[in-house]
Image (cartoon, rainbow, N blue to C red):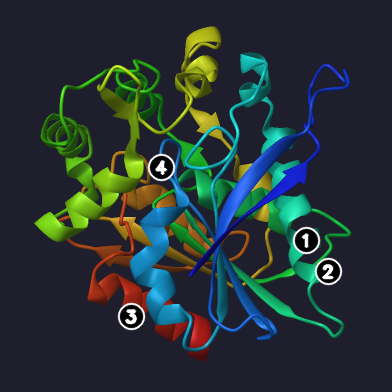
């Protein structure tokens, strides 16, 4: 596994020239492998969530896992309002695709795996014209074109609060408490998530490794249902959707419609998990692996 950073332009809704920022990514497998998988995490998460999946996928693919701006090892933005600009996330993803393509002299095949927010980025990306590399297959974990306000309000209760903790143990316990919907992870998996989610401060305290200002959209906009059916209906890329049976983000009704409209996705339900399946255990990894390799 290699950790890299690239400098990318800062797209902005106000069309003002902004300071460019770095996005970080881990790079797994053979650098010359033309079969590439890009993995992108959820709202407050980071690229190291994909270590278990990437370790398995690298047998068949080159795997690149991105830290979305404001998270993990990527830069924090100068202006908080830019986190509320969806075109920024698309611009960063397109810059990453162009960067990947520049490594090759012959055509490559690119698949996208996204958890929650990362799935939405993949969905929007896959319907864009003239990408540097088109998306061949799309895997989405527990997100869809209708996101209920009640679930967004739950997320808004903790995103952006920037709590501080005296020890790693306190941090891990808090992270587990707010992430219980991830399902029955092992202590080793929780520890892995906590290590890579934590940021240490000069005073010895620790907190989350993301910019709390990413919550600006929850604070400055009325929280209501997000309806993206128009975009979903444009999606024609072969798509696999993993849904936690206890999810409050992706309802069973929405998942059923996703099988009949747009990409006509294959939906696999994961028992005992809410929002969202983290693609860390063998069962979930195997579902993704088999679909990418054989569907």
Q: Which residue is mark 1?
A: 99
Mark 4 vs 1: CB contact within 8 A: no
Residue 261 rendering spot, x and y as whole percentages = 58, 59
Please tell me which residue is depicted at 40% across the width and 33% down the height of the picture. Answer: 209
> Which numbered mark, 4 or 3, is in the foreground of this view?
4
Please tell me which residue is depicted at 41% across the width and 85% down the height of the picture. Answer: 290
Res. 286 mark: 3
Distance from Cα at disc 4 to Cα at disc 3: 22 Å
Dot 3 lies on which element?
helix
> Which numbered mark, 3 or 2, is in the foreground of this view?
2
Mark 1 vs 2: CB contact within 8 A: yes
Which numbered disc, 4 or 2, marks the residue that appears first in the sequence?
4
Q: Which residue is mark 4?
A: 45
Please tell me which residue is depicted at 63% across the width and 23% down the height of the picture. Answer: 84
Dot 1 lies on which element?
helix
Distance from Cα at disc 4 to Cα at disc 1: 23 Å
Distance from Cα at disc 1 to Cα at disc 3: 29 Å
Residue 104 found in image quarter: bottom right
Which numbered disc, 1 or 3, marks the residue that appears first in the sequence?
1
Residue 162 rendering spot, x and y as whole percentages = 34, 18
Q: Which residue is mark 2?
A: 102
Within 10 Å of the Cα at label 4, are there few (<14), some (14-19), or many (20+) other Cα atoms? many
In the rendered structure, the answer to whether residue 73 lies left or right of residue 110 reads: left
Within 10 Å of the Cα at label 1, are there few (<14), some (14-19), or many (20+) other Cα atoms? some
Residue 123 rendering spot, x and y as whole percentages = 62, 53
In the rendered structure, the answer to whether residue 102 lies left or right of residue 234 reads: right
């Amino acid at each position: 596994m290699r950790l890299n950073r690239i400098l990318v332009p800062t797209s902005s809704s106000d069309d003002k020239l902004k300071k460019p920022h770095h996005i970080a990514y881990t790079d797994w497998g053979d650098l010359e492998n033309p079969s590439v998988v890009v993995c992108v995490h959820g709202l407050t998460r980071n690229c190291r969530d994909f270590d278990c999946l990437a370790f398995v996928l690298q047998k068949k693919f080159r795997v690149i896992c991105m830290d979305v701006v404001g998270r993990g090892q990527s830069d924090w933005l100068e202006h908080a309002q830019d986190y509320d600009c969806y075109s920024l996330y698309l611009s960063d993803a397109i810059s990453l695709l162009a960067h990947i393509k520049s490594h090759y002299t012959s055509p490559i095949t690119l698949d996208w795996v996204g958890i929650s927010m990362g799935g939405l980025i993949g969905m929007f990306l896959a319907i864009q014209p003239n990408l540097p590399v088109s998306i061949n297959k799309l895997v989405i974990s527990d997100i869809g074109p209708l996101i209920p306000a009640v679930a967004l309000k739950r997320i808004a209760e903790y995103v952006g609060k920037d709590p501080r903790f005296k020890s790693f143990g306190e941090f891990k316990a808090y992270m587990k408490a707010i992430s219980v919907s991830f399902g029955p992870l092992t202590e080793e998996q929780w520890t892995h998530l906590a290590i890579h989610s934590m940021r240490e401060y000069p005073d010895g305290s620790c907190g989350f490794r993301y910019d709390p200002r990413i919550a600006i959209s929850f604070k400055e906009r009325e929280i209501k249902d997000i309806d993206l059916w128009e975009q979903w209906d444009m999606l024609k890329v072969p798509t696999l959707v993993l849904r936690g049976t206890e999810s409050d983000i992706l309802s069973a009704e929405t998942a059923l419609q996703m099988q009949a409209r747009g990409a006509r996705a294959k939906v696999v339900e994961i028992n005992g998990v809410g929002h969202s399946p983290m693609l860390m255990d063998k069962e979930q990894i195997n579902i993704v692996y088999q679909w990418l390799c054989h569907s």
